[in-house]
Image (cartoon, rainbow, N blue to C red):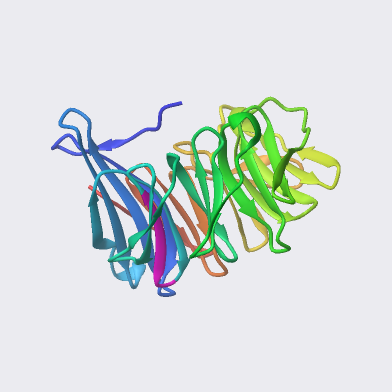
Amino acid sequence: MAREKYVTKDGFSIEVAEAFTYNSEGLSCLVIQSNEDRDIHLSEIKNCDDFTQGGPELVFEFRGWIYSMLQTDNQHVYVAHSGKTLRYGPHANPQVALSVDADITKLCASARGVWIVGLRGYVAHFNGTTLSEYPIPNGAHVYLVSEAPDGSVFACGDGGGLYRLNSGQWNKIDLSIGADIFRIIAQAADRVWMVGSNGLCALLDGAELRVFSPPDDRNYRAIAEYKGRMFVGAGHLGLDVIDELNVVSFKENVYSYYLYSDDEYLVSTGFNQICRFDGNQWLGTEFR
C-alpha cells in the first residue's frame, strides 16, 4: 500500500522518517524530500534542543537517499545512504564507516553497534570495527532485527517470517500465520511482540501466540512500548494501543509510520509530521 505524501508547491514530496529524543527535551529526525519528475532526492538530518521552542532545523544534508537513521546515543548516529554505504558520527557530520555488498533498508539498535538489514535476506552486525554477516535462509525478505535485553536476536519478514539467531544461524519459528511481519520488539528469548499486514498484532509468549483483534482496515508498520503500554502505528489512520484483548484507537490525527519511545516521551512520525507525547499532552509540527 503506497504511503500518503505531502507535496510542496515546488513539487517536492516530504516524508519524516525515523526520529529520536535529542538533548533531553529536543528531537532529531530524518526528513526525505523528493521530486521524481526532476530526479532530485534530498535527505536531511534535523535537530532541535527544545521541541517546545520550535521544530528541528537542518544540521546535515545529503543529495540522494538516506534509507535509514539510527541514533546510538545523544550525540551520534548511523545513517545508510546510496544503498550500500554506512556512515557514523555526530548528527551534523557522520563519516563513511564501511560499505556492504547489499542494498541497506533498515538500521536497528544493538547493545554494541548496529544491526544492518538489506534486500534479499541480508542481515549483518557492525560493532564499530568488525562486520559480521548473518544472511537469512533462501534470501527471504526481512524488515527488521530486534535485540532483546538478554541478548536474544530476532528478525521478521514476509509471510509470517519470524526468525531467531542461534549460534550464528537463523531458525524460522513456525507461527502458522500468513501476514507479513513488519516490526517486532523482542523483550526476551521467549517473548516477542509483532505487528504487520492485515491488522496483525500479536505476542509470542513462550510457545503461545496471542493475537489481538484490531480495528478495521489496519496495516501496522510500527510498534513501541511506552510507560508500560504497547502502542502500534497504523500510518495515516492514526495511533492505536493494545489492551487486554483488543487493539483500540488511541489518537486519530497523528501519522504513525515510525514510532520511538524512551522513559519520557513517545514520538510518532510520518507524512510531513512529527509529534511527541509526554503521557498527558501532544506536541507536534509539520515540515512544508
What count of labels does the image hold?
Answer: 0
Image quadrant where residue 263 sits: bottom right
Vertical relation: 174 (above or below) 105? above
- In the picture provided, is 65 more to the left or to the right than 114? left
Residue 243 in percent (x, y) is at: 71, 47
Q: Is residue 19 magenta?
A: no
- Which secondary structure type mostly characterizes the magenta part of the structure? strand
Q: Nearer the viewer, residue 147 or 286?
A: 147
Residue placed at 67% from the left, 47% from the top? 154
Q: Is residue 75 magenta?
A: yes
Vertical relation: 20 (above or below) 18? below
- In the picture provided, is 6 more to the left or to the right than 128? left
**Can residue 232 be seen here?**
no
Residue furthest to the right: 207
**Can residue 206 be seen here?**
yes
- In the picture provided, is 50 more to the left or to the right than 282? left
Residue 72 in percent (x, y) is at: 48, 65
Residue placed at 40% from the left, 74% from the top? 23
Residue placed at 77% from the left, 27% from the top? 176
Magenta segment boundaries in residue numbering: 74-80
Vertical relation: 29 (above or below) 156? below
Residue placed at 80% from the left, 39% from the top? 209
Image quadrant where residue 95 sits: bottom left
Residue 204 in percent (x, y) is at: 77, 44
Vertical relation: 115 (above or below) 23? above
Q: Nearer the viewer, residue 245 or 271?
A: 271
